[in-house]
Image (cartoon, helix red, strand yellow):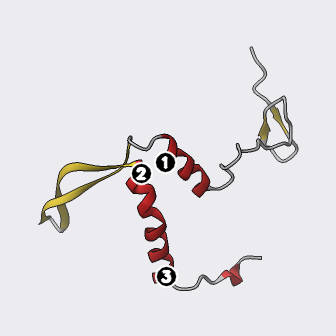
Amino acid sequence: MTNPGVVDENGVLWPSTSVGKFCQPAAGNETIWGCFSNAAKKYTGLLCVGERAVTYQEKVKGFDKFVMGAYSFMTCAPTHRLSPRSAASLQSSSPDPDYSAFP
């Protein structure tokens, strides 16, 4: 049986080849945005984000029942182009965060 790793004094399981060391991301993948940008460049024409529209809604025993339409997908390229605008609009519409609870 192969060695699954080493558990340190804090109960963290590490690979036996690199106890206490985290892996390093590839260049350009240090952030979520970097990962997403690289993936969008590599997989430009592949489907990325999908949605389904509500075609019918009714109340059933006090609960909302939704009938959903067919899926509609966008490929990586337009999703990547729209993402900064979506993030900026979310950021501008949200209140300033209160970081006082964090040490």
Q: Secondary structure at mark 2?
A: helix
Q: CA distance from mark 1 to mark 2?
A: 6 Å
> Looking at the image, which is closer to me, 28 or 58?
28
How far apart marks 3 and 1 lie (CA) works out to 25 Å
Q: Position of residue 44 (x, y in %)?
A: 43, 44
- The earlier-in-sequence mark between 3 and 1 is 1
Q: Amino acid at mark 2?
A: Ala
Tag 3 residue = 92
Q: Secondary structure at mark 3?
A: helix
Residue at 70%, 43% in the rendered image? 26
Q: Are marks 1 and 2 in contact (CB under 8 Å)?
A: yes
Front-most of 67 and 50?
Answer: 50
Rendering quarter of residue 67: bottom left
At label 1, counting other C-alpha atoms closer than 10 Å, the crowd grade (few under 14, some 14-19, many 20 or more) is many
Q: Which label was assigned to residue 40?
A: 1
* Image x and y of residue 13, in percent: 77, 38
Quadrant containing the C terminus is bottom right
Q: Which residue is mark 2?
A: 77
Furthest-top residue in this view: 1
Q: Nearer the viewer, residue 36 or 66?
A: 36
Instruction: Compare residues 2 and 97 and report the one nearer the observer.
Output: 97
Kindly identify the residue that appears in the image at 38 percent across and 55 percent down: 78
